[in-house]
Image (tube, coloured by chain):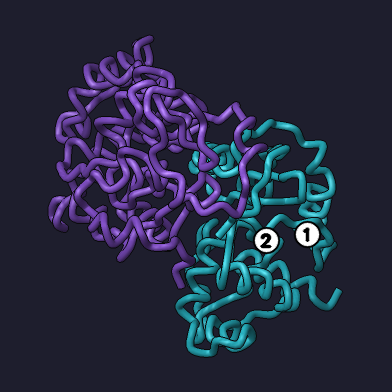
Amino acid sequence: MSSQLSPATTPLTSTSSINERSLVEPAETTPLVEPAETRSEPSGLVIGDDGLARPRWAAHDPLLRDYYDTEWGMPVRDERGLFERLSLEAFQSGLSWATILRKRPAFRTAFAEFMPDVVANFDDDDIARLLEDAGIVRNRAKILATINNAAATVRLREDGGLVQFIWAYQPDETPAPATYAQVPTTSPESVALSKALKRAGFAFVGPTTMYALMEAIGMVDTHLIGSHRRGTSGVWATAAVSERVPRCTE
Amino acid sequence: MRTDIAGDEAISYEVIDSPYGQLLLAASTRGLVKIGLDEADFDAELAALSRTFEVNPVRDSRPLQSTIGQLEEYFAGQRQVFDLSLDHRLASGFRQTVQQALADIPYGETASYGEVAADVGRPRASRAVGTACATNPLPLVLPCHRVVRSDGSVGHYGGGPAMKVALLDLEKRNRAA
């Protein structure tokens, strides 16, 4: 599975709660419930023993929980940080996001903290070193794509840079999903971003992958309604947006 | 909104070779739900299916046999119309309306974005038609490749403009047959 940095990266194995849920029940009526009790909500949220509502993918594994509480969906507006996320995105293909999170320190070491100027100049010796590094995901195509994307990132500086380039595709409004089924998997903006990045020479940047990136870096807020993290990115006017009924963008 | 996704779901998928590169095919219990044209995006697409339907997609080509067979015939120029159960739940609202209307564009012909907009009763919504095509979860079967710009240029395609040109060419050659 992939779609890095996104909840989708953790395949959901439990279907018990979905069988019980009333499909027409508006989720706005079921926000935070009694604390100090682990229970699953119809929306797919789980109330942790700290009383906070999180999606199921972030409810149990401490690493994922901490990531959800502090990183996922928070704005990333620096070049190095964005390049790191784009790169880990590509590496995640076929693996769980938890695996990538566990390997992230080794990735950062192996890829010079994801400094684009350094990675863009990796040579054959570096490639050989990376292919020997058991701490990361040793996939030649992805390693080469990362080096290629570093060079593309450096080139983009003449054109305003990666940060401006990606954030230009922020949509006018964010979804406000009550359930996973309401979280989009692509959007017109992710399709356009994918196309533009490919034109700029990037690899491993398909529209679904780019939607996951947009979720991870706060360009859209796909925290389920009722999650304690919804509206925390500061990117979206929370009061107005979280009340809005999600709709199809035309 | 997709509020009708109930339990007891299962997603089967297979990756097949086509003349235009690899394709991801995924089916739910209701029918074909996703065709992916961008190899580098397959894993993300599977992860997204996993999230939407709250099940783990399983690699199993058996539920996809008729899809695979009909696609092979289509690529060989031996099939002009698909006869498959489709699951439209990855789209909603106007986009889904447009995507379903795409099947009315005959094999070997094209329509402009504005013409499709008129066909679905929203003559000024050609941009929204473009959006519906760009986010079409079932390309090939719902033939967004037959929608072109009003100036005759092919426009964007999820599998790349070259694939769109090749598909239109394939259909033109086999239309009379």
Q: Is residue A16 above or below residue A218?
A: above
Q: Residue at x 62, y 38 (%)?
A: A18
State the residue position of label 1. Answer: B74
* Relative vertical location of residue A118 with respect to residue A131 in this rendering, above or below: below
**In purple, which chain?**
A
Find residue B140 and name its label.
2
For the residue carrying disc 2, how many other residues have a C-alpha within 10 Å: few (<14), some (14-19), or many (20+)?
A: some
Mark 1 is surrounded, within 10 Å at the Cα level, by few (under 14), some (14 to 19) or many (20 or more) other residues, namely: many
Chain designation of label 2: B
Chain under callout 1? B
Residue A112 location in percent, x, y?
A: 18, 23
| Distance in Å between CA atoms under marks 1 and 2 | 9 Å
Q: Judging from the image, what secondary structure is the residue with disc 1 in?
A: helix
Confirm whether residue A104 shows in the render.
yes
Counting every numbered tag in the picture gives 2
Q: Is B1 in front, or is A193?
A: B1
Q: Is residue A55 left or right of residue B4?
A: left
Circles 1 and 2 in contact, beta carbons < 8 Å: yes
Q: Amino acid at mark 2?
A: Leu
Give me the residue at 28% from left, 47% from top. Answer: A218
Counting from the top left corner in percent of width and height, residue B111 is at 62, 82
Q: Which chain is cyan?
A: B
Q: Is residue B74 left or right of residue A54?
A: right
Identify the residue shown where x is 29% and y is 51%. A219
Disc 1 residue type?
Tyr
